[in-house]
Image: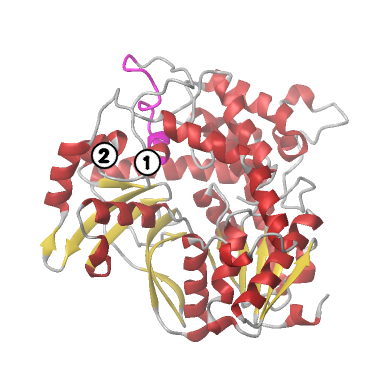
Amino acid sequence: MSADAGSSRSIVLIGAGSTVFTPGLMADLVSNRTFDGWTVHLVDLNAEAAEVMARVGRRLAEARGADVTFVPHTDRREALPGARIVTTTIAVGAAEGWGLDLEVPGAYGVVQTVGDSVGPGGVLRALRHVPELVAIARDVADLAPRAQLVNYSNPLTANVRGVTAETGVPTIGLCHGTMHTLAKLNADLGLADRADEVHATFAGLNHLCWLLDYRLGTEDLYPRLAALVQERAGGHDTPTSGEEGVHLPVSADLYRTFGRYPAPGDRHVAEFFGWYLRSSDGSAVEEDHLPWGLQQGRDDTIRYIGQKADLWERLHDQADGRVPVDGARRDQEAERLVSIAEALVTGREHVELAVNVPNRGAIANLPDDAVVEVPAVVGAAGVVPLRVGPLPPAIAAVLTARAQQQELTVQAALRGDRELALQALALDPLVPGPDVARRILDDAVGAHGPTLAAFSSPDDAARPDTAAGSPARPHASPARTENA
């Protein structure tokens, strides 16, 4: 254990192999004088990934004249003692696992645009991630009892629910999507240079969060937004580009249907409903001919999954000095984490547009234990969600059903319960029925191997190479754990 590991002036990043988030976090930390004298512990099961990131961090600190130390680890328990902030960006199974979460349901005509939060891909990802994140949280409780845990790993809602249901560790989930939607709406309304004057309130679940109030001073901006949506948004057969903005056909259709504008863009919100990823007659669609302008969203996901090698090549070049680190990409999401960390350690209050926390009355007509995305104040008192009142009844109905399905998913993950996992899959709007749910789960168990072995069919229980029927208690997964 390093001497600095026991200091409260430390930040631990678990899943430090994140090729986008980790460089952005390090660049933002060394640019903020609050963290001079701090140590950043970079944890990844891949020792080379942790070491490369630490070398990039050291070069960034030197270039910016910052007194921030970067230390690589493969054992999180070595890094955790006394930490003040712990961040998780893990991905059990890495990019390959995400690809399988798309491919396995796709064999049964279930097409997803992202597949990492909802849809059958989101369920399968939760079954792998929840136990591992609970295990991490238990180590945090043991070794860093003053720490704030900030999770970025998807599915964000299920992961935060699993941790908060099983441990007492203060935990929030962060996602950049709502922030990006607001920035794009402001730009579409010609308010990019007056963004600081705009007041916006979003509330809902991660990846389906609704704009409840939108104002510039005393002016209600919703009429202007409605006019632009009417003017620019396409329909069922309209190709589109970009993830946010008034031109998006699915978001526009949801606005017309439910009376509030959703975030964070069509490729995410479409997966919450049973009809956008179907043909107009309700039949299955081909994965390369998606309606509602959703093809680009799916293509972007596939492209992102496949680009890891190129990103790693550049990081190696930065670590070895072949590429200047001054060109390291700053990251809006990492910047939010640094702002939150600064507010927690200084006590200077900071308002966050959207954090994912246990509801506990923040949204009056959603389940109390559901993890919701709402605004919050961060400061000496920690992360305090703001109460936004009730949602419109139809929106509350959609989100309540989803929260209850996610609760089944979380309980399945915590117990290693195959029947609950099947029920969670069968209840997903993208899955046509229980028979397909069973086939997806069985194929996923075969594809993912040990990380889903607890959900094997009873027919496989007698096989010595499976863990079928045994509880999936949180443990240190042997699977490759990388960025989310």
> Magenta stretch: residue 278 in it?
yes
- For badge 2, the amino acid type reads His
The residue where tag 2 is placed is 247
Contact, mark 2 vs mark 1 (Cβ under 8 Å): yes
- Image quarter in which the N terminus is found: bottom right
Q: Which residues are magenta?
A: 268-281
> Magenta stretch: residue 466 in it?
no
| In-front residue for pair 78/383 | 78
In the rendered image, the vertical position of residue 308 relative to residue 236, given as above or below? below
Image side of residue 276 versus residue 459, left or right: left
Characterize the local packing of mark 2: few (<14), some (14-19) or many (20 or more) Cα atoms within 10 angstroms: many
- For badge 1, the amino acid type reads Gly
Residue 130 position in % (x across, y down): 62, 49
Instruction: Check disc 1 and report its element: helix, strand or loop.
Output: loop
Give the prevailing secondary structure in the magenta stretch. loop
Characterize the local packing of mark 1: few (<14), some (14-19) or many (20 or more) Cα atoms within 10 angstroms: few
Q: CA distance from mark 2 to mark 1?
A: 9 Å
The residue where tag 1 is placed is 242
| In-front residue for pair 96/105 | 96
Task: Place residue 240 in its image quadrant.
Answer: top left
Residue 65 position in % (x across, y down): 62, 82
Instruction: Check disc 2 and report its element: helix, strand or loop.
Output: loop
Residue 247 position in % (x across, y down): 26, 39
Image side of residue 446 versus residue 380, left or right: right
Task: Place residue 423 in its image quadrant.
Answer: top right
Q: Earlier in the sequence, mark 2 or mark 1?
A: 1
In the rendered image, the vertical position of residue 381 relative to residue 133, given as above or below? below
Identify which residue is drawn at 27% across, 69% down: 196
